Amino acid sequence: MTGKPVKVRITYCAECGYEPQALDLTKALMYEFGTQISAIEIIPWESGTFDVSVDGLLVHSMRRDGGFPEQTSVTSAVRSRLESARGV
């Protein structure tokens, strides 16, 4: 394992039907990192949101960045956080 496990938080608009994107991202993160992630918190919300945070740092916001995040950008953010926790 590289570094301390990280926590990922996905807040999505349930009213907008963004569940599939939230679940796809969750699945991709679990396959990629497994036990290197301490938790993935999935929060159904409203108002057209789709935000992703890694250890409290907002790495994607639909309002700020537009659209849904690329899975590769989120996995890169998680990998970067794991490396910084390890001191790389």
Image: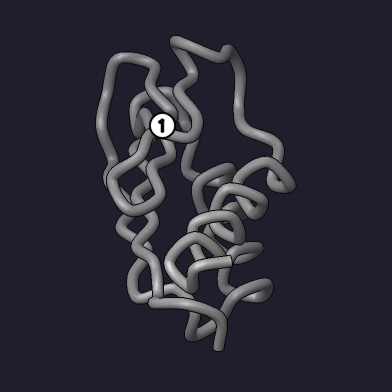
> At 30% across and 58% down in the image, what residue appears?
41
Neighbours of disc 1 within 10 Å: few (<14), some (14-19), many (20+): many
Task: Check the image and tell me how it is coloured.
Answer: one colour
Residue 7 picture quarter: bottom left
Is 26 displayed left or right of 6 in the figure? right
In the image, residue 10 above or below residue 2: above
In the image, residue 17 above or below residue 32: above
**Depth order, front residue of 45/53:** 53
The kind of residue tagged 1 is: Asp
> At 59% across and 52% down in the image, what residue appears?
25
In the image, residue 86 above or below residue 62: below
Looking at the rendering, in which quadrant would you find the N terminus?
bottom right
Is 22 displayed left or right of 53 in the figure? right
In the image, residue 3 above or below residue 53: below
Residue 82: percent from the left, percent from the top? 51, 66
Is 8 displayed left or right of 33 in the figure? left
**Depth order, front residue of 3/41:** 3
Residue 2: percent from the left, percent from the top? 56, 81
From the image, tell me which residue sits under label 1: 51
Looking at the rendering, in which quadrant would you find the C terminus?
bottom right
> At 40% across and 75% down in the image, what residue appears?
5
Helix, strand or loop at mark 1:
strand
**Depth order, front residue of 33/10:** 33
> At 41% across and 31% down in the image, what residue appears?
51
Residue 13 picture quarter: top left
